[in-house]
Image (cartoon, helix red, strand yellow):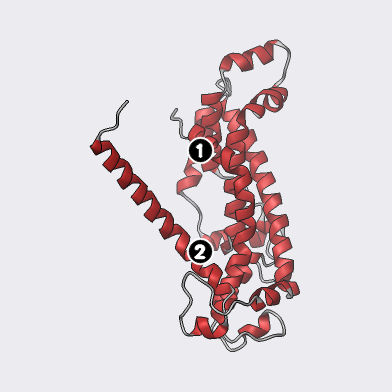
Amino acid sequence: MKTSIGDKIVDVLIYVFIGLLSLICLIPFIHVAVKSISSNAAVTANKVFLLPVGTNFDAYGQIFGDPSMMHSLWLTVIMTIAFTALGMILTICSAYALSRPKLKGRKVFNMIFIITMYFSAGIIPSFILMNTLNLLNTFAVLVLPLAYSAYNMIILRSSMRASIPPSLIEAAEIDGCNEFKILISVVLPLSVPILATLSLFYAVGRWNSFQDALYYITDSDLKPLQYKLYELVNSANSAGLSQEIGTQTLQSPEILKAACIMFATIPILIIYPFLQKYFVSGVMVGAVKE
């Protein structure tokens, strides 16, 4: 089938638009990366854009040599794994129950979950609640409060309704499977793409979050990586910045900030390619309307 000139022009415009959009997303990341390995003099003189000038890795040496930063990194890894696992367990259980037509009152439960997406008590009541529950300055306060997402539950529930035929579940019931067996043996194996997608949502959201730590954590041993980065960026121009990240001194705090940003970003970028195929197919499944 021949392509008309108009179609070719449209294709070119689409490619140009996507290319420009990709550059808009990529250039800031490249700029931060090359700044983190450039010399102090070049960064101070604003000579660094897309290529490193006077390459050196002193900033990364200071970061990896700082025990508190490495402690925050491992704390964040453990916290992200625990948060993602708990969030997926809660999401799977609620989504499966609400996807079953025979659940009595499921419309009421759906409405209750949806209300939480639009209304919240606010920061001060949440702080009072965490204090009353004795969760301040604990590991649990970084995992439990945000471990459930009604939005993710709705996506998974819609996916289960759209991709799992009722006849398949009926066949499992005839074979004597209870609800737990149906969930483990039938529903979950058919929901791998959307489960991988939601796991990525939970993991990235927890990895990038710092506001709950800002409100609830004052113990330096419980500060996650993003909170440490937040403190570093806020104090980047202070006189004592270089002493917070090791014993050596950096002349330009911009290099240290850029290195910390890369330090916090690269781990999650390494994970994404392994989940990309599930992420794409899972988003398409979750986009099916009820």
Whether tag 2 and tag 1 are in contact, CB under 8 A, the answer is: no
Give x and y (percent) for residue 193.
Answer: 59, 35
Of 211 and 62, the residue lying toward us: 62
Give me the residue at 61% from left, 43% from top.
Answer: 275
Q: Residue farthest to the left? A: 6
- Crowd rating for badge 2 (residues with CA inside 10 Å; few <14, some 14–19, many 20+): some
Residue type beneath disc 2: Phe
Residue named by callout 1: 283
Residue at 47% across, 65% down: 28
Q: Is residue 216 visible?
A: no
**The residue positioned farthest toward the bottom in the image shown:** 239
Dot label at residue 13: none
Q: Using the image as rendered, state which of residue 112 and residue 278 is in the foreground.
A: 278
* Vertical arrangement, residue 189 with respect to residue 10, above or below: above
x then y, percent, for residue 4: 25, 33
Residue type marked 1: Val
Identified at 66% across, 73% down, the residue is 60
Give the position of the C terminus as an image quadrant: top left
Q: Considering depth in this image, is 63 or 213 the residue closer to the camera? A: 63
Seen in the image, is 172 located left or right of residue 205? right
Q: Secondary structure at mark 2?
A: helix
Q: Earlier in the sequence, mark 2 or mark 1?
A: 2
Which corner quadrant of the image does residue 152 belong to?
Answer: top right
> Which mark's residue is nearer the viewer, 2 or 1?
2
x and y percent of residue 143 in the render?
67, 54
Q: Residues within 10 Å of mark 1 (few under 14, many from 20)?
A: some
Could you say whether the residue bearing mark 1 is in a helix, strand or loop? helix
Quadrant of the rendered structure where residue 235 is?
bottom right
Residue 257's place in the image compared with 102, above or below, is below
Q: Which residue, given by chain and number where applicable, does mark 2 sit on? A: 29
